[in-house]
Image (spheres, rainbow, N blue to C red):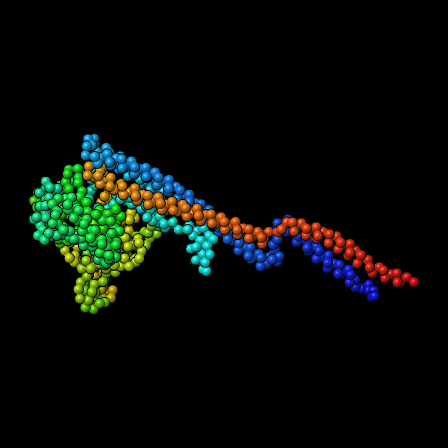
Amino acid sequence: MSFSINTNVASLQAQNYLQADQTFQNQTINEVTSGLRIVNSGDDAAGLAVANGYRSTEAVLTQGIQNASQGQSELQIADGGLSNISQLLDRASTLATESASGTFTGDRSTLNNEYQSVLSEINRQAQSIGLNSGGTFAKNLSVFIGGGNGSTSAAQITNGSVSVDLSNATVDTQSLGLQGYSAGYQTMTASQADSGFYDLSNASATSVSNVIANTNTTGTTSFVISGPGFSGGAGGAITVNVNLANVGDTTQLATAINAGITAAEQTGTAQAGAFTAANIQAVIHTGKDGAQQLQFTSSNSAFEVTAGDATANGLMGNLTGQSAGGLASGATDVGEDVSTASAFVADGTQQITGLAYTNLASNATAADADTQSLAITANNADGVPQSATVTMVAGTSADLTMDNAIAQINQQLQATGNAALQSIVASDDGGASGTGQIYFSDASSNPFTVTVGQSTNTAGADIATTGLSAGVPSTNQSSQVGLSATSAIDTEAGAQSAVSALASAVTTLGNAQAAVGRGENLFNYATNLAQSQLTNDTTAESGIRDANMATEAANLTKAQIMLQAGVAALAQANSAPQNILSLLKG
């Protein structure tokens, strides 16, 4: 056995153990007082990384549940508004049905005044809940909730989002088919006077039968209709061929034209599909004075109607001897030649009208042919400006006529793939081929801008005086032109049409309510899943991060006992060298 006074090994060992006991006690006290198993990164670095991942997911899910709750609240507000609009449609139907009766002896104007106020209230409420055309929520709504898995960040965002498509759930009067766009010589509503305009009724000198008898020899006529997706440069305008064999009055005329429209819709082409979606119909407008005129209407699309021949031109009100703005005393029942005036752009649309066009000159050298660029800007459904530059270029062998210029413009607009720009249509005034005026129209309620650039040739070095606005740069802002074709019940015929339109409106409203209801259910399902994920992630994090208090209480007792024993042992170890003194006593 060895004795040493220079190095007290037992004391050093006791100190080490005592230090370890002190550290163990301190850690245990931290875990007990904080409730955490991982107080510092060094306690469990790998576990802390996993726990932090769970905590991040919990933060996302917590806010995601709030997002879903807010989305569901907005849809519930919209749902309540749709219920109110349903009641308004019921009232409108009651008024229309009363006015549609042939035995009604009261004042239809009184009924119509209330009817129009109901339509106005429908528009106001649709705007209030954001489901009017171009409204706040009239789009595909994507709400991020979280909890989605994927190999990429984009996939995780997509899988963690809920989409509710309300782009087709608009419920203003335009969307419900109670207000749209009309094209024709007379484009006023039935409640407005139209004295002085032509009359196709049987009692008129310019009746349907007279116009056909004195203008047509083939038994057929045609109308050319263009709009978004079915215009020059966008697959071609739609030609509606009309069989006049059994047409002798306005009712038969509208029926024959609509039969031609139906046949044109069934050709199976892409432009026929766009034409079908535009929902264009021929109707007979009857004013308070009894005068009847041919109109074309659409509930949702800007369009242009051009007469295909003199007969169609006459049926649309362009008659030989007619003065501007009305039927002159010298007017006949013979339709004018289509090169004189034959085109009608739908009223109620945003339009830029009357930009004069002169043929862009060709040149055997392509670089020396006239060219002109247009910058077109329109807002999308979110109010964000969308822009495109379209260029009109003359060829090497022929000047660029107005029809070909329109084709180039429409083709490039459709090629953008941007809905805000694709809805804009360039059309002409129906004047002589090659020269005249170009119109731009859009069914959207948002104004758009066409900036005309300088016409140039010789590879852009020389200034030309051809094209739009004689090649002079200009900025043109659209504005709404004319009145929309609004449903009215101040005539028996108008009321009968309104009853039919309201029946369709109820169906359209039901579809909108179904879309909103689906959205509410989706948010409810997504919220339930997110809450389940949040609970499970929180449980998993707790298992890693939180302290087991029963275990830590036992550890604290253990640490206290070990620390007390260690202090006592250290005292004994420190006194051990004193035993050597007994060996020195002699």
User: Residue 131 at x, y = what percent?
Assistant: 34, 44
Residue at horizontal 20 percent and vertical 53 percent from the top:
263
Q: Quadrant of the C terminus?
A: bottom right
Residue 291 figure quarter: top left
Q: Is residue 363 above or below residue 468?
A: below
Q: What percent of the width, then of the height, locates residue 475? A: 26, 53
State left or right for residue 30 relative to residue 421.
right
> Is 217 or 206 nearer to us in this picture?
217
In percent of width and height, residue 375 lies at 28, 57
Q: Nearer the viewer, residue 368 or 399?
A: 399
Q: In the image as oriented, which residue stretches furthest toward the bottom?
A: 365
Residue at the extreme top? 106
Q: Is residue 312 visible?
A: yes
Along the line of sight, which residue is nearer the eye, 428 or 452?
Answer: 428
Measured along the vertical axis of the image, is residue 57 above or below residue 90? below
Is residue 353 visible in the rendered image? The answer is no
How many numbered marks have been drawn onto this rendered protein structure?
A: 0
Q: Residue at x 71, y 55 (%)?
A: 21
**In the image, 383: left or right of 328?**
right
Q: Quadrant of the N terminus?
A: bottom right
Q: Is residue 581 left or right of residue 220?
A: right
Outermost residue, right direction? 586
Residue shown at 19% from the left, 32% from the top: 103
Q: Nearer the viewer, residue 262 or 128?
A: 262
Q: Position of residue 236 (x, y in %)?
A: 21, 57
Q: Classify residue 179 by image quadrant.
A: top left
- Residue drawn at x 23%, y 34% is 98
